[in-house]
Image (cartoon, helix red, strand yellow):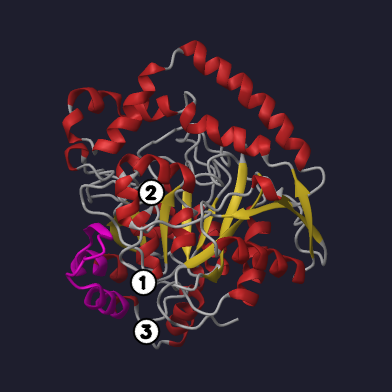
Amino acid sequence: MNLQISHLRNLYLTGALKPTDLVKQLDAEIGNDDSRHIWIRRLTLEEMQAFAKNLEGKNITDLPLYGIPFAIKDNIDLAGIPTTAACPEFAYTPTKSATVVQKLIDAGAIPIGKTNLDQFATGLVGTRSPYGACQNSFNSEYISGGSSAGSAVSVALGLASFSLGTDTAGSGRVPASFNNLVGHKPTCGLLSTSGVVPACRTLDCVSIFALTAEDAAQVLESAQGFDEEDAYSRKAIIRLNSLSGKFFSFGVPKLEQLAFFNNTETPVLFNQAIKQLESLGGKAVEIDFEPFLETARLLYEGPWVAERYAAISDFFETKPEAIFPVTKQIIGGATKFSAADTYVSQYKLKALQRKAEAVWQSIDLLVTPTAGTIYTIDEVNADPVKCNSNLGYYTNFMNLLDLSATAVPTGFQQDGLPFGVTISAPAFKDMSLLTLAAKMQKISAKTLGATGLPFIN
């Protein structure tokens, strides 16, 4: 079934489909098989029908996401459904939905389930869960990417039109790249994090997975908005779209600063993506990527990991046996940092932010691989920390530098696994990036996710 938002909307407007019929089809299609470990809690047919029936009699044109099914990462609250953060002993049942979830429901969207993730959103692999390692939508031997693992795979397999993830260090982009999806990491604070289990609260943001950039933009329009209940919420700033003209400049790291981790195909695919951008009027500008790399190293080597401990400190101390081993190792390491360490790192970050600001004087956006390579589940299990670190090479700096970013699929390896790049820009350039991502898809995309359905311009 084609779950593109525009396609479903046309069916609803012509009367060819009703939301109650859609959820019946989805329920049958998803079935009871979860061999890829996508779901932590699927909504029952009756629960989905309650949302669908609530749309009856409402004007479709008033609801931009009328009848559109979506999945929710299970560290984001949906009223009446347990939130586990992939830790059964941590679970609680919220009485109200996260602000962003409620905004989507109010726009007509229908939640279909809570998805699997790296426990407490700590990881880029999708394997750190007691609910099982989430499997790649193209090849089950490979990782899905994380931490928003099930959110990406559910959309890639055509089980949801879009999904919500979170992105602190790359969790809204790496799984998108590995599953041939668009993954948008909004400007921090643009989407409310009220009702989201924090990882690093000062850096967290809610992310969007979609089959197309146009779908992601439509979801972003409905999901964004200032939230007085969220101390980190920010009012949107309207910025001119510097990427809407015929010509734009994009930064590319120096050759010696690119890392592909012994993958011989991804350098070629990255060069192809650069040529795609040039065909759209872009001019490549070589930049010094070192300030970005130094910033990235701060995220896990510096005291920001202590935020992960602060988020669950009571639970961590009282029920350490309930935490996934690798997750416990990472979060437990946070206790070695002192308050003085935090200030020293803050000073270093401020200096790096100033260096990075200078780069934007000569470019409109930055282009990197989303990830230099992809690993099998067995490879990650054999060396979980190093593999995860490699996957964050191009992603860990984004929120520390207050950037907006969109992961875009741009090609495939010879073994059929997807590859993509990330385009990023300063805060509040979200719609500019998604507009460019849509143009990129039109010249590179052939199919939607892992559905095999054709991408239609």
2 and 3 marks in contact (CB < 8 Å): no
Q: Secondary structure at mark 3?
A: loop
Mark 1 and mark 2: span between their CA atoms?
Answer: 18 Å
Q: Which residues are magenta?
A: 21-49
Q: Pointer 2: what residue?
A: 147
Side (left or right) of 275 relative to 77 = right
Kind of residue at badge 2: Ser
Tell me which corner region of the image, top left, top right, bottom left or bottom right, holds residue 411.
bottom right
Residue 253 in the image: state x and y as whole percent.
69, 48
In which quadrant of the rendered image does the N terminus lie? bottom left
- Residue at x-position 31% and y-position 66%: 140
Residue 157 badge: 1
- Residue at x-position 76% and y-position 52%: 364
Frontmost of labels 3 and 1 is: 1
Residue 410 in the image: state x and y as whole percent.
58, 68
Residue, far top: 340
Q: Secondary structure at mark 2?
A: loop
Mark 2 and mark 3: span between their CA atoms?
Answer: 34 Å
3 and 1 marks in contact (CB < 8 Å): no
Residue neighbourhood size for the residue with mark 1, other residues' Cα within 10 Å, grouped as few (<14), some (14–19), many (≥20): many
Q: Secondary structure at mark 1?
A: loop
Q: Is residue 337 above or below residue 8?
A: above
Side (left or right) of 356 relative to 337 = right
Question: Does the magenta portion include 44?
Answer: yes
Q: Pointer 3: what residue?
A: 17
Residue 131 in the image: state x and y as whole percent.
21, 52
Residue toward you, 133 or 240: 133
Residue toward you, 98 or 349: 349
Q: Earlier in the sequence, mark 2 or mark 3?
A: 3
Q: Is residue 301 above or below residue 381?
A: above
